[in-house]
Image (cartoon, rainbow, N blue to C red):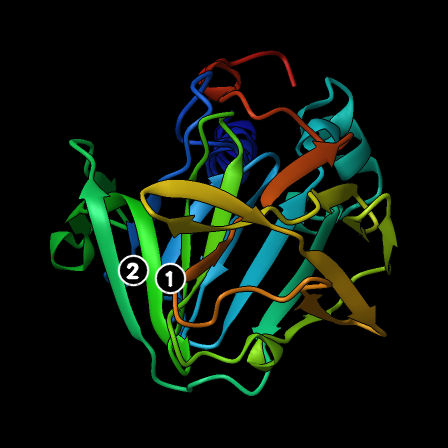
């Protein structure tokens, strides 16, 4: 029974690590790293069947096939193959680098949440990490000269990022380099990223400027050269005013659910 409990606790860890903390509520929060993650990670966010780790010059997307590890016959198969549950879990990780960007941007958070997170490792209370803060928005200021990038939940309950170009910014400076994907291409103006587990769509960008208190759209499209994404503006724009580009990210996955499944962690059975 002790061995069974260890396996079930591992399943609990897997579900916790790769499901959304928000449960059925489609919101994305950015949790600070106070030592529960590697030092290069500044913040993390749960997405459908995975995580995003925010670093100084890149984002790491880490997906897992949670459904396979929850299958009723998984425990028997793991034992028959004499492998660990960790080895059984299928994962895919890729990175998005801010190519040629500022290596030390000013990273700010806003919209703090009431929820705090606690991480209990082992029996030594001095190593426990408690009251970890979370936020609704994270902003990389001057990731490029006069350009910031902000991540938050859109009104459509999707993950969204804004690129804000201040006067004097050069839009051609923005280059997002995708490493570790199976395939990447443009379709109907959208960026389609394919991994071994799922598909991520960065919807075609909408850009605008505020002119005389009115939001004026600016034609904008993706440009993909190999694995490097940039933006073009066929009709140009007023470079004396700020410009905002704001794509949405859609996680179309067959590798799991966004909902938490903590109930699977608590039961004993004959296995």
Q: Are marks 2 and 1 in contact (CB under 8 Å)?
A: yes
Vertical position of residue 10 compared to residue 174: above or below: above
- The numbered dot on residue 134 is none
Name the residue at 47% across, 72% down: 239
Query: For this view, does 155 lie left or right of residue 15?
Result: left
> Residue 160 location in percent, x, y?
50, 43
Vertical position of residue 114 compared to residue 93: above or below: above
- Is residue 89 something one can see in this rendering? no
Determine the image quadrant of residue 61: bottom right
> Residue 134 location in percent, x, y?
25, 44
> Residue 22 location in percent, x, y?
40, 26
Residue positioned most to the front: 212
- Is residue 117 something one can see in this rendering? yes
> Residue 269 location in percent, x, y?
58, 12
Q: Find numbered disc 1 in the image and state the secondary structure of the residue it sits on.
A: loop
Name the residue at 47% across, 41% down: 46
- The numbered dot on residue 37 is 1
Determine the image quadrant of residue 140: bottom left
Badge 2 is on which residue? 33
């Amino acid at each position: 029974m002790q061995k069974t409990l260890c396996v079930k606790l591992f399943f609990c860890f897997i579900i916790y690590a790769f499901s959304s903390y928000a449960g059925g509520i489609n919101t994305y929060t950015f949790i600070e790293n106070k030592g529960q993650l590697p030092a290069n990670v500044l913040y993390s966010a749960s997405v459908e069947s995975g995580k995003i780790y925010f670093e100084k010059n890149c984002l790491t997307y880490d997906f897992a096939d949670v459904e396979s590890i929850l299958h009723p016959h998984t425990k028997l198969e793991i034992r028959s193959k004499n492998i660990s549950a960790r080895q059984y879990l299928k994962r895919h990780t890729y990175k998005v680098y801010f190519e040629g960007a500022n290596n030390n941007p000013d990273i700010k958070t806003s919209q703090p949440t009431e929820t705090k997170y606690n991480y209990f490792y082992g029996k030594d209370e001095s190593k426990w990490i408690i009251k970890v803060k979370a936020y609704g928005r994270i902003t990389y200021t001057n990731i490029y000269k006069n350009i910031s990038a902000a991540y938050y939940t859109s009104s459509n309950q999707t993950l969204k990022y804004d690129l804000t170009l201040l006067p004097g910014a050069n839009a051609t400076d923005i280059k997002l380099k995708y490493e570790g994907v199976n395939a990447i291409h443009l379709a109907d103006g959208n960026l389609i990223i394919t991994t071994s587990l799922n598909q991520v769509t960065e919807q075609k960008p909408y850009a605008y400027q505020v002119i005389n208190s009115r939001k004026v759209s600016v034609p904008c499209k993706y440009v993909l050269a190999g694995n490097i994404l940039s933006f073009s503006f066929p009709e140009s724009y007023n470079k004396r005013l700020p410009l905002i580009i704001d794509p949405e990210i859609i996680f179309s996955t067959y590798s799991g659910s966004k909902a938490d499944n903590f109930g699977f962690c608590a039961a004993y059975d004959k296995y």
